[in-house]
Image (cartoon, rainbow, N blue to C red):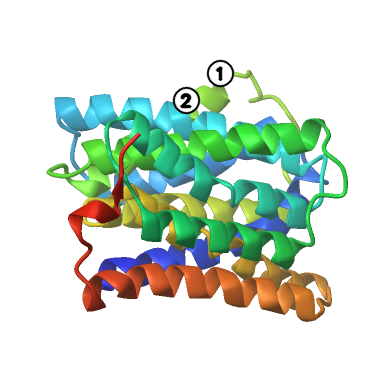
């Protein structure tokens, strides 16, 4: 249960950063922002870890980090083109992609997972009001959702038995290296507001968040992880109300309730009922 609680806190931070990142990239280019964000995240992890990764930690971290970097690049470019609400909705679709990717690796689907995913997706749609039109930005964030789902599955399969801190450090380093390859060192310095966003996203939404995710995913299956991450749009709405002064009606509140109900129901179901063998869906 403690793994779930910590991971919920991570999704709260990620939800908040939809507004933070949107504001930052309206003032500063996307690639340099990501470069500075993940360089800071890597430095924080180096200070915290204070040891070299093992060969397996290095290999897993580099692969997972490359997938993560691709996900953040597509998400951030897409976020510059569409509203945070639509970005949150489409990113939340990773709850559909995760069990599908997991199925490719031979993991059977359960009916309760399918039902919970459907309820969560409906809730996300109600929460954000649905996309106003499907364009390039929407397509990029769909790609981001697929990549984030792949990242979840890979960590769920590879991270058990590995130390979470060095693994998270390597992932942050891989992201920093990839974004630094764009040759952005000579660009102008960020403003104070952008630096605040870099610190928030680099320290809390990257270094600490992915340490917690890597640690938690050693104990939580990939589909359940995706459902917990489905809370992110609800937190994004809360941040929009507090930070941007936006107001949302009954439809959005009902959507948030559906998302939370899907997550809590999926978490509580194994505690109350032992799933029979015929609950597995083979394809």
Q: Which residue is pictured at 32% across the width and 43% down the height?
A: 168
> Label 1: few (<14), some or many (≥20) within 10 Å?
few
Q: Which residue is pictured at 28% across the width and 43% down the height?
A: 156
**139 relative position to 55: left or right:** right
Q: Are marks 2 and 1 in contact (CB under 8 Å)?
A: yes
Mark 1 secondary-structure assignment: loop
Whole-percent x and y of residue 237? 70, 69
Instruction: Give the alpha-carbon distance from disc 2 to disc 1, as whole Å.
Output: 6 Å
Whole-percent x and y of residue 277? 19, 54
Q: Is residue 119 above or below residue 110?
A: below
Q: Which residue is mark 1?
A: 181
Where the C terminus falls, by quadrant? top left
* Residue nearest the viewer, comparing 112 with 192: 112
Q: Is residue 229 above or below residue 243?
A: above
**45 relative position to 277: left or right:** right
Q: Is residue 200 visible?
A: yes
Residue at far right of view: 132
Q: Which residue is mark 2?
A: 177
Q: Quadrant of residue 193?
A: bottom right
* Residue nearest the viewer, comparing 193 with 268: 268
């Amino acid at each position: 249960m403690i793994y779930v609680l910590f991971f919920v806190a991570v999704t709260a931070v990620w939800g908040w950063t939809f507004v933070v990142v949107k504001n930052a990239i309206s003032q500063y280019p996307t690639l340099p922002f990501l470069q500075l964000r993940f360089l800071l995240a890597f430095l924080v992890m180096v200070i915290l870890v204070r040891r070299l990764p093992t060969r397996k930690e290095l290999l897993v971290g580099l692969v997972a980090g490359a997938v993560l970097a691709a996900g953040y690049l597509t998400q951030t470019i897409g976020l510059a083109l569409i509203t945070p609400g639509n970005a949150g909705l489409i990113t939340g679709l990773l709850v559909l992609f995760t069990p599908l990717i997991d199925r490719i690796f031979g993991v059977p689907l359960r009916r309760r997972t399918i039902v919970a995913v459907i309820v969560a997706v409906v809730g996300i749609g109600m929460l954000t009001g649905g996309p106003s039109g499907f364009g390039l930005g929407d397509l990029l964030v769909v790609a981001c959702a697929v990549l984030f789902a792949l990242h979840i599955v890979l960590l769920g399969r590879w991270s058990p038995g590995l130390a979470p801190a060095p693994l998270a450090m390597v992932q942050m380093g891989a992201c920093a290296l990839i974004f630094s390859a764009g040759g952005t060192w000579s660009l102008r310095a960020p403003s104070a507001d952008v630096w605040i966003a870099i610190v928030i996203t680099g320290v809390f939404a990257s270094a600490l968040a992915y340490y917690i995710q890597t640690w938690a995913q050693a104990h939580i299956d990939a589909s359940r992880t995706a459902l917990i991450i489905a809370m992110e749009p609800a937190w994004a709405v809360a941040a929009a109300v507090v930070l941007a002064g936006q107001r949302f009606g009954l439809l959005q509140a009902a959507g948030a309730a559906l998302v939370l109900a899907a997550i809590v129901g999926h978490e509580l179901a194994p505690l109350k009922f032992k799933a029979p063998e015929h609950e597995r869906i083979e394809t």
